[in-house]
Amino acid sequence: MSGGLAIAGLVVSLGGRDVLRGVDVRCPAGTVTAIVGPNGAGKSTLLRAIVGLLPSTGSIALDGDALAPLDRRARARRIAYLPQGHEVHWPLPARDIVALGRLPHGAADPDRLSPEDAARVEAAMTETEILHLADRPVSALSGGERARVALARVFAAGAPVLLADEPIAALDPRHQLDVAAALRRRAEAGAVVALVTHDLGLAARFADRVLVLRDGRVAAAGPPEEALAPGVLSEVFDIAAYRAVHEGRPVLVPWA
Amino acid sequence: MVAAGRRRLAIAALAAVAVALFLASLGIGPVRLPPLVVVEALLGRGPETSRIIVAEIRLPRALLALLIGATLGLSGAAMQGLLRNPLAAPSLFGAPQAAAFGAVATLSLGIADALSYALPVAAIAGAFLSVFLLLAVAGRNAGLVLLILAGLAVSSLAGAATALAMNLAPNPFAALEIAFWLLGSLEDRSMRHVLMALPFMAAGVAILWSRRRAFRALTLGEEGAQSLGIDVAALRLLVVLGVALGVGGAVAVSGSIGFIGLVAPHLCRPLVGYDPARLLLPSALAGSCLLLAADIAVRIIPSTSDIKVGVLTALIGVPFFLLLIVRERRRLALGTLA
């Protein structure tokens, strides 16, 4: 597994406090990694450092090549990032928001997309089932629709790495499952997918690997059965869980 | 793509209105000239008196209204794009006041006369300092309330400093001459004034125009834009520089004219589907229309002495701003207008 994202000794300090204190993690291409942990464990910080939004020390490499020497735009072509909350400041039509995903590839004007850019935008909107909303201003969409527009934007980028910060928070169960399945398909198409989530059940079911963070360090990492073992849950989260297996996938429901 | 057609139509209509107002501005004054005579005079034909009136007396004034209006409209749209806020505008942040102080200080200290290039340079420095100071004080992700409070402080400071410079002016006549920077006007300007302001305004407009795509990316917030490859820190500096060049260059020859940068983008936003990148061109055109119209109005409104155009734009602009606040009140209260 030489392909994929490899992070070693990652340290991030914010305001004099070490938020990440030496994180090592590998996210192979073609897999989904769920990043979980209590509030303040450094989950979002980890994603933001990988995107390049925060200064960090340590190494971040994609397919063996360090990301640090790349300029912003080159990095943006490799990593698509879905921030928490899907903030959109102006009521642009949904299609124009999705087309922003092609900006790192030089698609500056949503009215004059190249055939490839247009095809990627169209495909991403089809995949997230928002084609019928294309001309609607995002301000007129429901929370679930907006989340799918945001997801389509990162899908349209076609980047080898896809990082999503709580992509399913505030979605109803149907949309949670749809979004998780869409991310899973991206991984199966060969992308590195990593998402931050508080939903341990979803992490157990959809992720190939789970990274458990606590106080800026890796508390556990590995397949869901290992990384979310009873010992880890009680130590890191102070909870127990009901466990089962359904359709070949682990089922995990936090319980007490 | 229907929207694209509608947008082009709106831009063409704005341009047509600007041209019509430009011609009207050349025709209106103590001697009224019909549009046909104005066009003839511009082409160097027709009676000599009308040629002199149009080309030498009224053309500089109309050109300045056109160019300054465009600069202020575009600066406002750029500022709103950067801050992702429809209530942001250079005049609310004290930029014209600070630019006026720069100009007044050079005059009262006797560094330069009113037609020297030192004047726009000082005005630009004043505007740059004020906007830079404002963004530094208010912080990276400042909400509107913070920005307006900081802007209020900056404009008060600039106003006080200007008053001090007037007190220190060498003679009462100089003080009177200085006072006109506080009330923007386009009266009695020559081509010399146009040439003095043009390079700076053109540079500012070029800088802001070149960054228009970044404003669209900023729709996703600063981190969203950054993750798309936009250098947000560099963008902020460039916008501050572009606004300072534009506003400073304009103030150096017209004095402080406010609210064009607030009103013009707001009127155009629905025409372009709220896209901050597409907003720049129509805002510039609408800015030209507004200032040309205001400058025509001050000549038409009957009064014993001339009304200053800056007074008129403020008289219209402030109630407009209050109306905007009322309309945005709900969102402001909810804090979503970060």
Image (cartoon, rainbow, N blue to C red):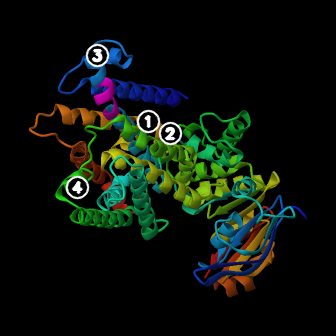
Q: Secondary structure at mark 3?
A: helix
Q: Quadrant of residue A116?
A: top right
In this rendering, the label closer to the viewer, 1 or 3: 3
Task: From this view, report whether residue B26 is shown above or below residue A87.
Answer: above
The part of the chain drawn in magenta is B54-61
Element type where label 1 sits in the image: helix
Labels 1 and 3 share a subunit: yes
Classify residue B192 as left or right of residue B183. Answer: right
- The CA span between labels 1 and 3 is 36 Å
Up/down of A120 relative to A34, above or below: above
Tell me residue A166's x, y (percent). 62, 64
**In the image, what residue occupies the spot 40% across and 57% down?**
B122
Query: Residue at image x 33%, y 51%?
Result: B113
Task: Tell me the residue that label 3 is attached to.
Answer: B48
Q: CA distance from mark 3 to mark 4?
A: 36 Å
Of circles 1 and 4, which is in front?
4
Q: CA distance from mark 1 to mark 4?
A: 39 Å
Name the one closer to the observer, A133 or B217.
B217
Contact, CB < 8 Å: mark 1 with mark 3?
no
Give yes or no for contact between labels 2 and 3 (Cβ–Cβ under 8 Å).
Answer: no
**Circle 2 residue:** B278
Contact between labelled residues 2 and 4, with CB atoms less than 8 Å apart: no
Q: Which secondary structure class fits the magenta region best?
A: helix
Is B301 colored magenta in this rendering?
Answer: no
* Contact, mark 1 vs mark 4 (Cβ under 8 Å): no
Residue under pointer 4? B174
Front position in the image: B293 or A114: B293
State which chain disc 1 sits on.
Answer: B
Q: Are marks 2 and 1 in contact (CB under 8 Å)?
A: yes
